Amino acid sequence: MQIDTVEFFYAAMPEVTLEADGSQDALLVRVVSDDGHVGWGECEASPLTSIAAYVTPRSHGVCQPVSASVVGQAIDTPDDIRRIASEVRRRSMDLLQAAHTWSGIEIALWDLLGRRREEPVWRLLGYETSHPKVPYASMLLGSTPQETLERARAAREDGYRAVKVGWGAFGASVASDADHVAAAREGLGDDGELLLDAGQIWVDDVEAASERLEALARARVTWLEEPFVADAYSAYAALAARTPSVALAGGEGAHTASMATNVIDYGAVDYVQVDTARIGGIGPAADVAAHAVMRGVVYVNHTFTSHLALSASLQPYAGLADHRLCEYPVHPRPVALAVTREHLARDGNGEVRAPDAPGLGVDVDLAALDPYLRTVEILIDGVSLFRSPAATGNLG
Ligand SMILES: [Mg+2]
C-alpha cells in the first residue's frame, strides 16, 4: 500500500479573536492510500502556514517541502510511519513549520493503518487496554476573580473533578494572581484538583514566577503549567527547586520528542504535556510517554480543539493506567465541535478514554464542517501549487 493523496481542509470561525483559544480554526488532513483506505489527522496552529510548508518550492536540499517525503511512500506498518518521519526530518530540516504539517499527516497515517487493520491506534502502539482518564475542564481565566470563581464552580457543577484555569489576566500582578488562584479554589471546592496554566507569561524570569508560589501552594494546586517559554529548561529547573514547592508541568510547546524529554530531564517537571498535533504526531508522543514512565514523570495530553485531536492526543498514553489526568476542551468553538460526528463523552464515572474502535475511532463530518470551510489557493507565477479540495464525499 502506498500514500496516494494528502489533502488539507482549512476551517475557521467567521471571526478569529485575540483570545488564546486554539479552537477558532482547524487544519484537517485526509490521507488516501492507493488501495482506497482513508485516514484523518489534524495539525495544531496556523493552518495556512502549515499548508504552505507542504507545497512550498524547495530552498535547498534539506529545506524541501513536506510533500517531498510523503507521496508515493509505502505505508504498511507503524515502522513505515517512523521511516517517513525521519525522511521529513532530514529533507525539511530547515523548514520550521514542517513539524506542524507533518504532525497532522502522521496522525492520519495511524488512523489509516488502524482502520485498515480494524484495530484502535492504541493497540497498534502495543497497549492492551484503553484506560479511563479523569478529564480536567480546561478553560481561560475569568476577567475578574469572581468570574474565575464562577467558571470553576460551573465546571464542578457540570461534574468535573479537576479544573484548569489560566492565560488571560494571569500574570498581571502578584496580588491579582493570588486572588484568581484563591477564587478558582473556592469555586472548585476543597476536594477538586486545581491546575494553573501561566501560559509562558514569565518567559524565563524565575524570580517573577517564584513570587506566586506561596499563593499556589496555599490553594494546593496540582501543578503550575508553563511558567516559562517551552525551552527555558534551566528556568524550569530553578523554579522547581524553590520553596514552597509546587509541581511544574510543561511540554506542550515541544515540536520534537527531544524538546519534551529535555523538559523532563533538564527542566525537572513532574508532569509532561504533549500535543500530538505539534510534536510530530502519535509516534514521538508515545516515545515521550515511555520516557516519562522511565523517569517517574506523569504524562498528560495537551489539546484544546476538536475531538479528532482529542482522540489522537489520548492514544500515546491510553494504556498507562497510572497516568490519569486528561486535558478536555470544555468550551471549544463551534468549528471545532463540527469536525467529528462522534464526541468523546464522559462516562458514568465522569471519565473519558480513547475509543475502542478502528483508527482514532471518530469520523470527520465534512457536511457539518462545510459552513466553516475556507477555500485556499496558492499561486506562483500564475501556476497553482495548492487549491482546497472540494468538501464532498465523506470518505472515512
Ligand atoms: Mg497550556
Image (cartoon, rainbow, N blue to C red):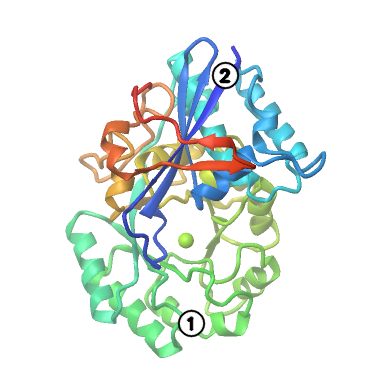
| Pick the front one: 295 or 309 | 309
> Picture quarter containing residue 64?
top right
Q: Earlier in the sequence, mark 2 or mark 1?
A: 2
> Picture quarter containing residue 181?
bottom left
Looking at the image, residue 218 lies above or below residue 136: below
* Residue placed under numbered mark 2 in the picture: 4
Looking at the image, residue 175 lies above or below residue 171: below
Indicate which disc residue 212 carries.
1
Position in image of residue 287 (x %, y %): 63, 39
What type is the residue that disc 2 sits on? Answer: Asp
Position in image of residue 277 (x %, y %): 52, 44
Looking at the image, residue 380 lies above or below residue 16: above
Residue name at image x 40 percent, y 68 percent = 18
Position in image of residue 150 (x %, y %): 21, 71
Residue name at image x 69 percent, y 30 percent = 69
Looking at the image, residue 376 lies above or below residue 5: below
